[in-house]
Amino acid sequence: MKTKITEILGIEYPIIQGGMAWVAEYHLAAAVSEAGGLGLIAAASAPAEWVRDQIRQAKALTDKPFGVNIMMLSPNADEVARIVVEEGVKVVTTGAGTPEKYMKMWKEAGVKVVPVVASVAMAKRMERCGADAVVAEGTEAGGHIGETTTMVLVPQVADAVSIPVIAAGGIADGRGIAAAFMLGAQGVQMGTHFVVTTECQVHENYKDSIIKAGDIDTRVTGRSTGHPVRALRNRMTREYLKKEQEGASFEELEQLTLGSLRKAVVDGDVANGSVMLGQSAGLVKEKLSCSELIQKLVQETDALIGGKGFYE
Ligand code: TUI
C-alpha cells in the first residue's frame, strides 16, 4: 500500500495511530510501528521529561519510525517541541491548536510535521507554514473535536491543499479506509480501534466499554466552553451535560472533568471517568494485537480497492 504518506513517513502501510492523551504511550506506539503503521506517543499535558523517557523506551522496542503527538494547549508544549528534536524523533503530529511557532526549528531538524486540523482554513494555514501533510479529523473522532464530519471535511481539505491528506474520525475498518481513499486521502489515522489492542496499556474496563458501545453511545461535552470533547455516554457526561444546560460556570464544569481521563484509563472507572472514544466504537468488536489489526485492515482495504490505482 504505497502512497505519498508511506513515502514521506518511511512506513509500510498508510495507517497512523492517533495521539491519544493518557492512552498512546510507548508500548502501543512501538507495536503499531513494528506492525508497519506509524505509532505515536501522546505528549498530552505530561511533563516533558516523561515524554523524553517514552521516546527512549519506544526506541528500545523498535527501529522503525514512530512519532510524537504534541497537544498545543499543554503548558509543556515548548519543552516537548525541543525534546523531539533532541531525541531525533522522525514525525511530529499536533492537535488542539497551531504549531506555527515550532515549524522553523522542526523543519531545520528534518522532522516531518503533520498537524491535525478540523477545518479547511486551518489546513491551508498549515500548508503555508510548511507542514508535510495534514490529518483532516472529522467530528466522529473521540476527544477534542471540530464540528465538520469526515465525509465532507476530507474532500474539501484534499481540494484545498497540495500536500497529502490523512483522514481521521469514524474510521475503524477496511471499508472506512477505502472510503477515505475515495474522498481524496492518502492515508488514515485511527484511534479508537487501537485502544482495544492487546499492546495498549489502558484498563480493561476502558477496552470493554469500547467493545460494548453501539452507534449512539458517545456524547459531546463542552460545546458551551469552546472545547467540545467526545466521550462515552456515562454518569460523568450525563452530569456534565445537565450542568452545561443549567448554565454552570466554566470553573464548575472544569471541576467535573479534572483528572477524569486518568480515572478512566488508569483506575478503570468508566462510570465517573472520561472514556474518550470515537463514534467508530460501534464498529469495534474484538481485541486483536496491533499486527493482527493492521493486517486485517490492509486485507479488507485491498479487497475493496486493491489494483484500482489508489495505491500500488
Ligand atoms: O487534539 C485532538 N484531540 C484531543 S486533544 C485532547 S486533550 C484535551 N482534553 C480536553 C480539552 C482539550 C484538550 C483530547 N483529544 N484532535 C486534533 C484536533 N485538533 N481536533 C481539533 C483540532 C484543532 C482545533 C483548533 C486544531 C486546530 C485548532 O486551531 C484553533 C486555533 O485557531 O488555534
Image: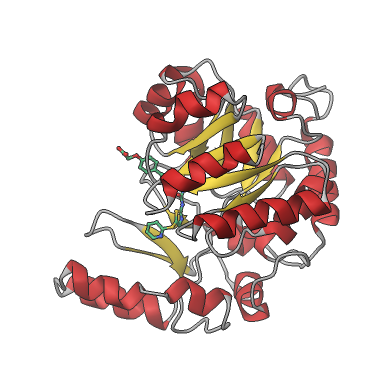
From this view, report whether residue 310 is shown above or below residue 223. Answer: above
Q: Quadrant of residue 50?
A: bottom right
Q: In this figure, what is the number of numbered marks?
A: 0
In depth, the one of 10 and 310 nearer the eye is 10
Query: In the rendering, at what x and y percent does residue 53 appear?
Result: 65, 57
- Quadrant placement of the C terminus: top right
Query: In the rendering, at what x and y percent does residue 238 appear?
Result: 35, 78
Q: How is the image coloured?
A: secondary structure
- Quadrant placement of the N terminus: top right
Q: Quadrant of residue 250?
A: bottom left
In depth, the one of 12 and 173 nearer the eye is 12
Residue in view at x 41 percent, y 50 percent = 145
Query: In the rendering, at what x and y percent does residue 259 appear?
Result: 42, 75
Query: In the rendering, at what x and y percent does residue 265 appear?
Result: 57, 74
Residue in view at x 61 percent, y 29 percent = 111
Residue in view at x 44 percent, y 79 percent = 234
- Would residue 221 be seen by someone viewing this image from the given angle? yes
Answer left or right for 1 relative to 200: right
Residue in view at x 77 percent, y 24 percent = 311
- Would residue 157 be seen by someone viewing this image from the given angle? no
Which residue is at the far top?
162
